[in-house]
Image (cartoon, rainbow, N blue to C red):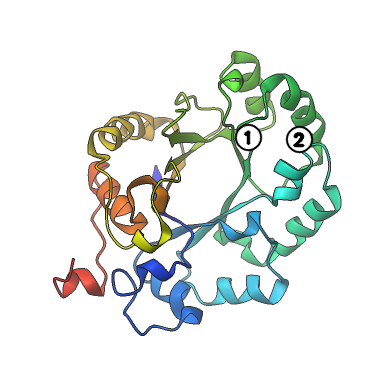
Amino acid sequence: MRPYVGCSGWSYEGWLGHFYPPRLENRRWLEYYSGVFDYVEIDSSFYKIPNRNTAIRWVQSTPANFRFSAKFPQVVTHDTRLGGGLDALEHFFEIMKPFQSKLLCLLIQLPASLTKNEGLPKLERLAPLLWKKYRYAIEVRHSSWFDRDVYKLLSKYNICLAWSQLDAIQTPPELTTDFFYLRLIGDRSIDEKDFGKIQKDRQVEMEKWAKVVNAAKKKVVFGIVAANNHYAGFGPSTANGFRKMIGLEQVQWEEMKQGRL
């Protein structure tokens, strides 16, 4: 099993002087990040689909072994609640083409208010329209989705049920594909200006997920772990700590090497 552990996004001012060197220009942040971690979740595609030149630049500024996942545009998942936005979705699929082998999967993140009763029929209509060249994961945030009928449908269409650790809800670690996708999210109580250091102790919770991941290793081809800043305060440290828990070597960046953390 090939594990990919990294952060949800890389463009955070709060990381300057904590992860990024203090004077590093933001146009070089991804290049620097990809020299430390081998995976990142593209969070910004949820808010705005990048243009082709941006997508190509992201691909070209990262090493050959670097991997991405990317969120579906919100017009599909939130604005139309899986009921529309198909033109935007087609455009999104086109924009993702330059990533080719660097793209692990595309993430369908649903709103917390979308229940199984409303969403499952829509997902059944959407699933056959998804481009076969990409892999998919879906993150649900309402407990009604934690149901055998849902798992069966996801397996049928080879869609991974993302395991989400929020403060309000936790996804059962069901496997519906040959890969897993764990998202350490937390809540929105940590301010962006405090993203440069750990604010909450999530050790016990992370250890529980590490046991789940270690148990799944023989059942999957690869796994994805994305650490959000809102989870504990500093995504890189969360990702690094989780790497150690699942037997991976911890990564280092300049602030660590110089003993500033």
Check disc 2: other Cα within 10 Å, few if <14, some if 14-19, many if 20+.
Answer: some
Q: Which mark is residue 127?
A: 2
Residue 159: mark: 1
| Labels 1 and 2: the sequence-earlier one | 2
With 242 as the anchor, is 113 left or right in this view? right
Q: Quadrant of residue 141?
A: top right
Residue 8 pos. (x, y %): 47, 54
Residue under the image location 39 percent in, 83 percent down: 24
State the residue in front, 192 or 38: 192
**Type of amino acid under label 2:** Ala
Name of the residue lying farthest toward the left: 259
The quarter of the rendered structure image containing the C terminus is bottom left
Within-10-Å neighbours for mark 1: few <14, some 14–19, many 20+? many
Q: Under tag 2, what secondary structure?
A: helix
Give me the C-alpha separation between circle 1 and circle 2: 9 Å
Compared to residue 181, the image places residue 230 above or below, namely below
Where is residue 238 drawn, in percent x and y?
31, 50
